Every structure is written in structure tokens, then in C-alpha cells.
Amino acid sequence: MKQDIKSMTPEELQAELSALGQPKFRSGQVFSWLHSGVTHFEDMTNLSRQLRQTLQERFFITAPTVARKQVSALDGTIKYLWRLGDGNCVESVVMRYHHGNTVCISSEVGCPMGCKFCASTIGGLVRRLEPSELLDQVLFSQLDSGLPISNIVLMGIGEPLDNFDNVMRFLELVNSPQGMNIGMRHISLSTCGLVDRIRELADRKLQLTLSVSLHAPDDAHRSAIMPVNRRWNVDTLLNCCREYFEKTGRRISFEYTMIRGVSDAPEQAELLAKKLSGMQAHVNMIPLNHVDETGLETSTPQAIRRFQTILEQHGVTATLRRTLGSDIDASCGQLRRNYEAAKEEAACRPGD
């Protein structure tokens, strides 16, 4: 079987080419081609024709195609639905900020975590993405949009820490000076709270930003909307987060979706402030994106302001996430969901 050459580290690529009798510098040339977006070995023009043919026989190059693309007329946010080599689709979003352009990428096709408010998990997990497929979302978002990407957020479809090994390899690849060279401090990784994997991540002492999806400060409400809480409850998760900070020195960002009647009560703000007391933490409040299938609604502006005020009165830093792309399928997983539904509908239509 052919190997996925773009998922190889520089050291692995060098070993493969050395086995083919190639000099050390050759692997650097191939790595640079791959990370510039070349999709065919034939286009690697500084390699001999014989080497290009050998590479073609042994390896393949991943390259997604655009299944759908939406551009916000309000703020220029671009949402991509990428079709992968096997026909599955994942989403990426390019967002413009004053500090640079950020791409939010997916880590899995579908998601196994079952969070009640999220469109990504409807239908469950299909498969995990390869390191090359993670990298492609960054690379081809940059190439298609023409916008240089300086920041990465792993907060799209899927749970990044459920795809731990492939995500770690992707981070190594995208951080490589020979490739896109995006620094760890410009990368954020979001998790719903896989405590065992957070501990493993802490041991690596990476300088990325860890974002933990909390969404409720008490077990009753969090377990109702996030099944992961039934395995690792709020206190267990927060204790793990304290350990993470002690090992890495990196402040944790807590994602907190404002859901009407579920997570926005004043007493919940009081409890959240109490549980975060003494932690180096930041609360990122997120108005719920509407997803028809969930039956959940976002909090009122008044409830959001009240919640934020209570946190700040207790010394907890809290900000309200800026809403981008509100005129397109902004909710994570919604574009893929709508696309798949449209395909199913077309397949059932008589005469199509």
C-alpha cells in the first residue's frame, strides 16, 4: 500500500529517502513542496524524473477539494466544507482579526462525545482525521482564501484529544520551521474534558493554549448536556486543570456556552466563580449557535450581561466571544449537516 507522505515528520521523510539512496537535503526539498500545497509529485520540479516516479509509486499526497464555501457579507468570515479523499466532509472557518487571520479546523469526521447543543455530534463519529488531513485544512484554507494564516484553533468538528496521536503529530508538522512554521503560542486546542488526555498533554509541556469546554459549573446540568461529565465530573476536571497549569505555566481558557434556562442562572455564575477561585483562568462566554435538532436556545442579552458581571465581581476574567459569520452556517457542524441532508434528499428524489 502507498504511504501518506504528508503525515511524515522531517526525520521520517529523511529516513524514507535515505533508504532510496537519496542525499539528506532531498527530504527537505520534498517536505517544502508538500507544505506549500503541491498535490502531484510531478510538480516537484527540482527532483529528478526518476525520483518523482519512484515517489509516485510508493506514496500519495492528500489534497481536499471544496465541497461548499460560504463567505460572510458582514465580516468576511469564510466557511469551508472540505471533501476528503474518501468522500467524507469536514469544516474549517477562516476568521479575520486585528492580530491576524485565524483558521478553526476539525479533528474528526463527526464526533463521539454527544454534547446536546452541538451539530457536530449528530450522527456520531465516522472516523478520525490523519495528520495530513489536519494540516491540509490550514494549508488549503490559506491557499484558497489568499489570506496568510497566523493562528490555528482546533475547535471544529470532533474532539481533538480523542484523536490524540494524530493531533500531536499535526502540531509537530505545522510547527516545523521547514513547513508552515506556526508557533505553539499561536495555536489553541479545545477539549470537552478528557482528563486522561489532558494529563498526557500536560506532560508534553507544549506552549499552546488549552481551552476546556465547561458549559455548566454543576454536575447535574453539565451531565445533562455533556455525557463526558458522567465519567469525569466538574471537580475532577477542574483539579486536572489546576495540575495542567502547575506543569505548563499556561493559563487555561474555559469555554462557556450561554444556554437559556440551562447554564445562565445567577447562582450558576456564583458557583462558577467559586470553583475557579485562585485559578489562572479566563472564561470565554459564547452565545449558543442555534441548531434546530437540539431544541435549545441562546440566553438573552440581559442574562449574559448579568452572568458576566457576577464573574467579574468575584475577580474572574470573562469576555463575550465576538460573533462572526452570523449570516452563514456559523454553528460548528451545521454546514456539513445541511450538506449531508441535501445529498440524502436528492438521492430519494424520483427521477434524480
Image: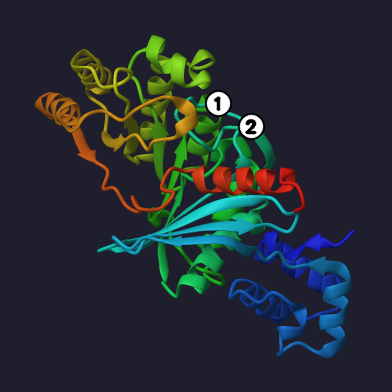
Residue 9: image location, x then y, percent: 66, 61
Indicate the quadrant where residue 267 lies: top left
Q: Secondary structure at mark 1?
A: loop
Q: Amino acid type of disc 1?
A: Gly
The residue indicated by pointer 1 is 114
Tell me the residue at 64%/78% (across/down).
33
Q: Amino acid at mark 2?
A: Gly
Considering depth in this image, is 213 or 146 the residue closer to the camera? 146
Q: How does the figure colour the protein chain or chains?
A: rainbow
Among the 4 quarters of the image, the one containing residue 265: top left
Q: Residue at x 41, y 31 (%)?
A: 213
Q: Earlier in the sequence, mark 2 or mark 1?
A: 1
* Mark 1 neighbour class, 10 Å CA radius: few under 14, some 14 to 19, many 20 or more: some
- 52 or 280, which is in the foreground? 52
Q: Residue furthest left?
A: 313
Callout 2 crowding tier (Cα within 10 Å): few <14, some 14–19, many ≥20: some
CB atoms of marks 2 and 1 within 8 Å: yes
Tell me the quarter of the image containing the N terminus. Answer: bottom right
Q: Is residue 213 above or below residue 321?
A: above
In the image, which disc is placed on residue 34?
Answer: none
Compared to residue 199, the image places residue 166 above or below, namely: below
Count of number-bearing discs: 2
Query: Is 179 or 301 nearer to us in this picture?
Result: 301
Residue 176 can be seen, yes or no: no
Q: Which residue is mark 2?
A: 124
How far apart marks 2 and 1 lie (CA) works out to 7 Å
Q: Can you say whether 275 is above or below 134 in the image? A: above
Picture coordinates of residue 142, whole percent (x, y): 48, 69
